[in-house]
Amino acid sequence: MNVGIKIALYIILISGACFFGYKGYESYTKLMGNTPETKVSPPIEEPVVEKTGASLATQGYSQVMGYGGGFFIVLLCLAFLLSHDVTNYLGNRVLTSIYNDEGEGLNDTQYEIAEQVWADGNHLEAIRLMREYLSANPREQHVAIRIAEIYEKDLQNNLAAALEYEDILKQKLQPERWGWSAIHLCNLYFRLNQPEKALELLRRIDTEYGDTPAAEKARKRLALYESEANQELADQPAADEEPQS
């Protein structure tokens, strides 16, 4: 859900809860204050007094029940929305700790050896060691991203890097991490002269991960590409235009 829409829902629900709660309390206080007192009246007037008091009491109870019901429904919706957000937040925290996408606190000796081999300039051997480590620790997908970076930046092999990113996107990642990895793959597709794949992936980012910063970048890239395509189309001569002599 869009962040702006979610904030608006919170404002509406909280305002509704305050409104129904206040009106319900006001109606209840008014009902308790207007309870008819027992008075000595002529026999002819007693039925009229009882009828009026009953009518007022019924109306007051109806108002209290109506505002109370509205307050309960609004609170129920607010609790559902809040529980949904809390569940997503805790789920993302769990994924962060399980998949360790940022690589924070990683002190595994085998991985450090692979990084040292890379620093020594033996990139293919570093990739081999990283693959072994990733095979034993498949949840640590930041290692797969590191392999793709080595293919792209150190070995200048965009095709191999793209294949790595395609495998990465098949894994369960946080939305932000998935989105940026997909953006990186789009850039590789454009370099490999595969714009159809790039555009398809950009649209997927926008559709499935619309709330992420990566989706915003995808929308801008799509708009730019469409603008360039329209300009190229406008620059082409019409089919029935006569060539200049």
Image (cartoon, rainbow, N blue to C red):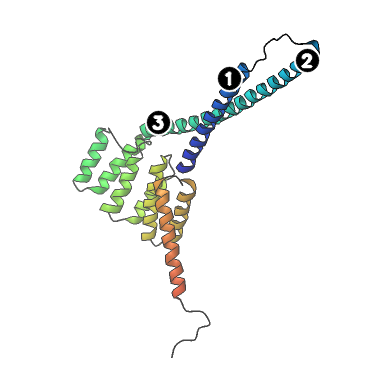
User: Is 232 drawn above or below residue 99 in the view shown?
Assistant: below
Q: Position of residue 139 (x, y in %)?
A: 38, 36
Q: How many marks?
A: 3
Q: Which mark is residue 29?
A: 1
- Among the two numbered marks 3 and 1 on one chain, the one whose residue lies closer to the N terminus: 1
Judge the density around disc 2: few (<14), some (14-19), many (≥20) Cα neighbours within 10 Å: few
Judging depth in this view, the residue of 85 and 203 nearest the camera is 85
| Circles 3, 1 touching at the beta carbon (< 8 Å) | no
Q: Which mark is residue 45?
A: 2
User: Is 109 drawn above or below residue 209 in the view shown?
Assistant: above
Judge the density around disc 1: few (<14), some (14-19), many (≥20) Cα neighbours within 10 Å: few
Who's the residue at 51% across and 33% down the image? Answer: 15
Who's the residue at 33% across and 48% down the image? Answer: 148
Which of the two discs, 2 and 1, sits closer to the camera? Answer: 2
Which of the two discs, 3 and 1, sits closer to the camera? Answer: 1
Q: Which mark is residue 94?
A: 3
Q: Position of residue 111 (x, y in %)?
A: 27, 37
CA separation in Å, label 2 and label 3? 73 Å
Residue 56 seen anywhere in this rendered image of the structure: yes
Who's the residue at 32% across and 41% down the image? Answer: 143
